Image (tube, rainbow, N blue to C red):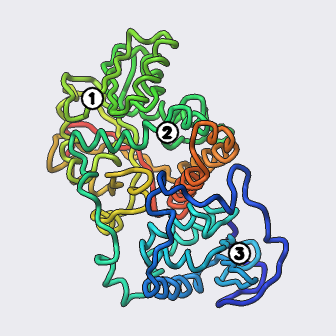
Amino acid sequence: MSTTSTGPKHTDETRHGDPAEKTPAPQGRSASPAPPAADRWPGLAEVPDVPARARVARRIFRHAVRKLRVRVHLPGGKIMGAGGFGDPVMRIARPDEFYARIGAGGLIGFGEAWMTGAWDADDPAGVLTVFARKLPELVPAPLQKLRRWALAVRPADEENTPSGARGNISRHYDLSNDLFALFLDPSMTYSSALFAPGDDLPAAQHRKIDAVLDAAAVGEGTRVLEIGTGWGELALRAAARGAEVVTITLSEEQRTLARRRFEEAGYADRIEVRLCDYREVTGTYDAVVSVEMIEAVGERYWPAYFAAIDRALAPGGRACVQSITMSDERMRAARDTWTWMHKYIFPGGLIPSPEAIGGALEKHTRLRVVQRRDFGPHYAETLRVWRERFLAEGAAVDALGFDATFRRMWEFYLAYCEAGFRSGYLGVAQFTLARGVR
């Protein structure tokens, strides 16, 4: 995304006929997908009938984009926004539907309008980055007071009780191993990579895993507990160092593939993979590692999560937790809301702040953070690569039985997350934990 303007500004709806900006949608999706199937996408097939709310949404949106370095194209050649040539371009194909969905669902409706094709962009991550950088300022101050009544509340069935957590995890990770294999690197690592100059994605993923293992002092003869198996790459690299590993997951699909990978690599005798909740872990270990698992735990259960790590860690042991993070102020504002991400991608989750992590450790464990490594921009690059790979595999996604609405949903998810990291709204960090630190 360009941060400088090389052309005229458009502070309100104007006409502009620049043919250079009428580019086709990226490979792997259509800017005009078929309408969502009512049986597969309940609530998306019909446009909400909320004329009053749609009018309010239109006014708020127009007010917001006047200040943003983005060009919003409407039917008939009209353009809104403070962006110039080179700034991200957003195309609203069906304004009535776009405003109705936002009026009915707020930011959830904004994402749903993308899913149906009511709006589109060649660079959705660029557009969303502009919005993310100014997110707290987009709604006029008088309307900010109505925020708590306008935002959706999380459904009770997404609570991360032991049974609820299994359902929440299954909804995402049990979609299809083959789907994830289309856009992840061969290691099947589904978390932020850690890049050094010259790294491709596989090398950067191994660099991240090795940093976690180093932080937890994993080596020959180490007994390791991994909370959150993924598809097994961290356990494999720990076993290759001579460690004995117990790794736990709530995903049947992940356990099946991880077991096969352990057997094929010749490490089945060193790695045990259990279908197990972190609250059910027994035994003691020299090292505990957990990569991007805490985001799915839920604020109510962070004390239990860290207490489980504390119980499992042998005297003198070390733990390393990698977590997506956000500021404490943003976390507190988001803690009781239900977002597009909860509805369609990760039910039941909440991203913690570093302060929340430190507070939970201090109140509920003997553990303290002894080292912290932040690398948020690396996640933006990881997501960019994933999104490129996903878009290039459109035909293969179709062949797995996922429709065009799903493809647009998944692209929006990856772009939405990338924008969060590019804007600094989100971060990611590795927290090294140990006892006996004041």
Is the residue under label 1 in contact with that under label 3 (CB below 8 Å)?
no
Q: Disc 2 designates what residue?
A: 190
Helix, strand or loop status at disc 1: loop
Residue drawn 79% across and 65% down?
23
Specify few, some or many for label 2: CA neighbours under 10 Å numbering under 14, 14-19, or 20 or more: some
Mark 3 vs mark 2: which is more N-terminal?
3
**From the viewer's perspective, is 93 left or right of 168?**
right
Q: Amino acid at mark 1?
A: Cys
Q: Is residue 319 above or below residue 236?
A: below
Q: Nearer the viewer, mark 2 or mark 1?
A: 1
The x, y position of residue 428, in whole percent, is 44, 50
Specify few, some or many for label 1: CA neighbours under 10 Å numbering under 14, 14-19, or 20 or more: some
Identify the residue at the far front of this view: 39
Q: Is residue 227 above or below residue 124?
A: above
Q: Amino acid at mark 2?
A: Tyr
Q: Disc 1 designates what residue?
A: 276
The x, y position of residue 136, in whole percent, is 43, 76
> Label 3 vs label 1: CA separation?
51 Å
Return the mark for residue 4: 3
Residue closest to the eye, 212 or 88: 88
Helix, strand or loop status at disc 2: loop
Residue closest to the eye, 252 or 18: 252
Mark 2 vs mark 1: which is more N-terminal?
2
Residue drawn 43% across and 23% down?
256
Q: Nearer the viewer, mark 3 or mark 1?
A: 1
Residue drawn 46% across and 74% down?
48
> Label 3 vs label 2: CA separation?
34 Å
Mark 3 vs mark 1: which is more N-terminal?
3
